[in-house]
Amino acid sequence: MTSQQPETTHGDVVQEHGHGHSVAAWAGVATALVGFLVLCLAVVFTSLVWGIVGGVTILASLVVGYALSKAGHGVKSASGHAVGVGRARH
């Protein structure tokens, strides 16, 4: 049985989704990791204040990634559009 759709390779998936290779993605993940570190230390040392700080930092990582992406530091294709957006489906 043959398929009507072309076979998808790993390179196609990386190209379509950008695979997180952007300043926005790295900054968001780095901020989230700092937040998780603070949250883990808050659990070990039983500190509610540091737990709240860690949670807020984790939530702030979403804002950091989104803001940098909107500022033009997200993954872009050769045409300047975000990768995976408006791409023709096969």
Image: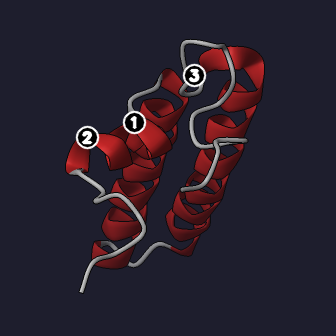
Q: Nearer the viewer, mark 1 or mark 3?
A: 1
Q: Which element is circle 3 on? A: loop
Q: Residue at label 2?
A: 11
Whether residue 1 appears in this view of the structure is yes
Q: At 38% across and 30% down in the image, what residue appears?
A: 21
Whether residue 30 appears in this view of the structure is no
Would you say the residues marked 2 and 1 are in contact, meaning their CB atoms lie under 8 Å apart?
yes
Question: Is the residue 37 above or below the residue 85 in the image?
Answer: below
The quarter in which the N terminus is drawn is bottom left
Question: Is the residue 22 above or below the residue 85 in the image?
Answer: above
Mark-to-mark CA distance, 1 and 3: 10 Å
- On the image, the x and y values in percent for residue 88 come to 64, 45
Q: Residue at label 1?
A: 15
Question: Is the residue 20 above or below the residue 8 in the image?
Answer: above
Q: Residues within 10 Å of mark 2 (few under 14, many from 20)?
A: few
- On the image, the x and y values in percent for residue 73 come to 60, 19
Question: Is the residue 50 above or below the residue 27 in the image?
Answer: below
